[in-house]
Amino acid sequence: MFDTAIAGSLPKPAWLAETEKLWPQWKLSGPELAQAKLDATLLWIKAQEDAGLDVIGDGEQSRQHFVHGFLEQVDGIDFAHKVEMGIRRDRYKAMVPQVVGPLMLKGRVHEREARFLRAHTARKIKFTLPGPMTIVDTVADRFYGDRVKMAFAFAELLNQEALALQADGVDIVQFDEPAFNVYMEEAADWGVKALERAAQGLVCKTAVHICYGYGIAANIDWKKTLGDEWRQYEKVFPALAASCIDQVSLECIHSHVPAELMALLKGKDVMVGVIDVASETIETADEVADTIGRALQFVPPERLIACTNCGLAPMSRAVAEAKLRALGEGAALARQRHR
């Protein structure tokens, strides 16, 4: 009746990297690190399958961070001289690389991970890339002098990699755009256009993930300032409904997003967040099924995908595994209820 999937990231095992950190340091290097990344990917493929998920991701095990994992393969970016910058409208500070010249891909970015993922599961696979607006918000510009121009330059590179991922056998290419929930007017004005440029020519399913952020203190504190209703989606959903993007991911469980906003995505597949990433409490199957039931008031069952609110990267491995099981069990219960 409907698929289940993760938003993207999963925790790094303790033998691969620091745990419960958003920017973990690797514990290995060279060929050992490359092999360990694939070993961790295989571990999470099995965990997702065991949990009953229909769409399998790589858990972003080969990337230190969802944006920088892509940027490391881009010429024109200086990683040696990072600078501190406020990102997501200065919600928190991060050490970011600088754009110092014309942007070009050094070569393939995620070929090894994508082909490994395709070779190790028979289920549908999804691969995530950062969206152009979110990349622009996570680098310091010392070259373009124009956010829109730089976003479209990144969109061209993302498109090159997305087309290659499609050729690798990826069923769904997802672009992560948390910046859409911060710069709402710009997102509706040019952010969605840059996103469409990144997805140009793809015949596989395309998706965009828009969230209120990982379950880290800065994001949790920010959410407390948003009031009783979080209506950020209201400003960008109409533009996405009119776009070429097939699937849209949103937060639902334990958020203050009015459920009726999902109706703005008529004609799109909706990835409904039914697993909270800001709490270590494990959802029950009933809670997950109830959240799905609320969403079905506004989303046809054939258009609904039960998902996590955001990535699980900063969580403990045990909690993430339990939440995956809750997602699978809750979706199965919801299917029984809504036959």
Image (cartoon, rainbow, N blue to C red):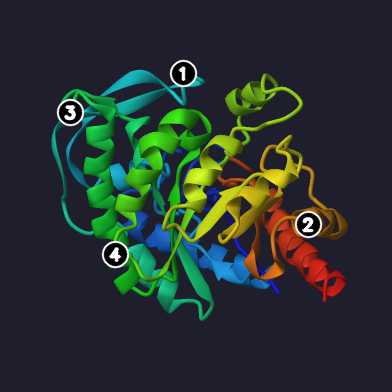
Whether residue 188 sits left or right of residue 329 in the image: it is left
Q: Eyeballing the image, is 274 above or below 217? A: below
How crowded pointer 1 is (Cα within 10 Å; few <14, some 14-19, many 20+) is rated as few
How crowded pointer 4 is (Cα within 10 Å; few <14, some 14-19, many 20+) is rated as few
Tell me the CA gap for discs 4 and 2.
Answer: 33 Å
Mark in front: 2 vs 3: 2
Quarter of the view holding residue 232: top right
Mark 1 element type: loop
Tell me the CA gap for discs 1 and 2.
Answer: 36 Å
* Camera-side residue of 247 and 329: 247
Mark in front: 1 vs 2: 2
Amino acid, disc 2? Gln
Quarter of the view holding residue 131: top left
Mark in front: 4 vs 3: 4
Among numbered discs 4 and 1, the one appearing first in the sequence = 1
Any mark on residue 144, and which? 3
Residue 69 at least partly seen: no
**Which residue is depicted at the point 76% across and 60% down?**
296
Tell me the CA gap for discs 4 and 3.
Answer: 26 Å
Mark 4, residue position: 201
